[in-house]
Image: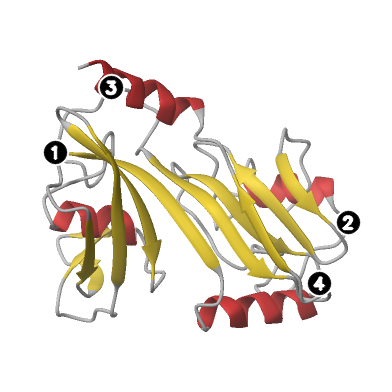
Amino acid sequence: ANPEKMDLDIVYVDDDVIVVNKANGVVVHPAVGNTTGTLVNGLMYHSKNLSSINGEFRPGIVHRIDAYTTGLLMVAKNDRAHEILAKQLEEKKTHRVYWALVWGVIPNDTGTIDAPIGRDSNDRKKMCVTAVNSKKAITHFRVLERYKNATLIELSLETGRTHQIRVHMNYIGYPIVNDPVYGRRKLIDESGQCLHAKTLGFVHPTSGREMIFDSELPNCFVNILNKFKEE
């Protein structure tokens, strides 16, 4: 992948890690046939050093968020940091909190969804809750605010499956607002699902300090949220 000049929202940077607040619509890393305009291209321009563990298409990338999910992502600048951060993710020692706006009014204040996720046999690009070739998936949520037709919730994941939050919320009948794939409701605009990786915490790979970062909801999310608040 080639470095590309890009307007990145870098929240924190040192010799080991970069914390970036990913904008809406930005794909995290290149893939075959799509090698430009990704977050990785921008990061390579920003930093000479990124870890090489995940190969040339995914330098520095320890974890991902979907293209139309916004928010905080940690990036490793060297292989040692990458290994330590990857281990923390695996051992569930990182702290990752998402905010989402979902259709419908959730009556209970908290909930846990424990339902295995695998590929949708009818559509290879989609994931679904299934017993076939699936992996365990657990999502916890807490209601932050209820509106007339929607609910603002906070979520934390015990597992990191592809599209996990989007699939799980749809599965329990409260799909994410404006989700073009799993929403099954009218789209409000083209800005993608109202899902934001709001808080990110991890133990620094070198200093051992607990690092915690928080981010504002992006405009694309706030614009839609305000429509529901006014109803």
Q: Are marks 2 and 1 in contact (CB under 8 Å)?
A: no
Q: Which residue is mark 4?
A: 78
User: What kind of residue is marked 2?
Assistant: Lys
Q: Earlier in the sequence, mark 3 or mark 4?
A: 4
Residue 137 visible in the displayed image: yes
Residue at 49%, 25% in the rendered image: 219
Residue 33's x, y, as percent?
54, 51
Label 2 and label 1: CA atoms lie apart by 46 Å
Instruction: Identify the residue under disc 2.
Output: 48
Dot 4 amino acid type: Asn
The numbered dot on residue 104 is 1
Lower sequence index among marks 1 and 4: 4
Task: Name the foreground residue: 216 vs 123.
Answer: 216
The mark nearer the N terminus, 2 or 3, is 2
Q: Which of the 4 image quadrants contains residue 119? A: bottom left
Discs 2, 3 touching: Cβ within 8 Å: no
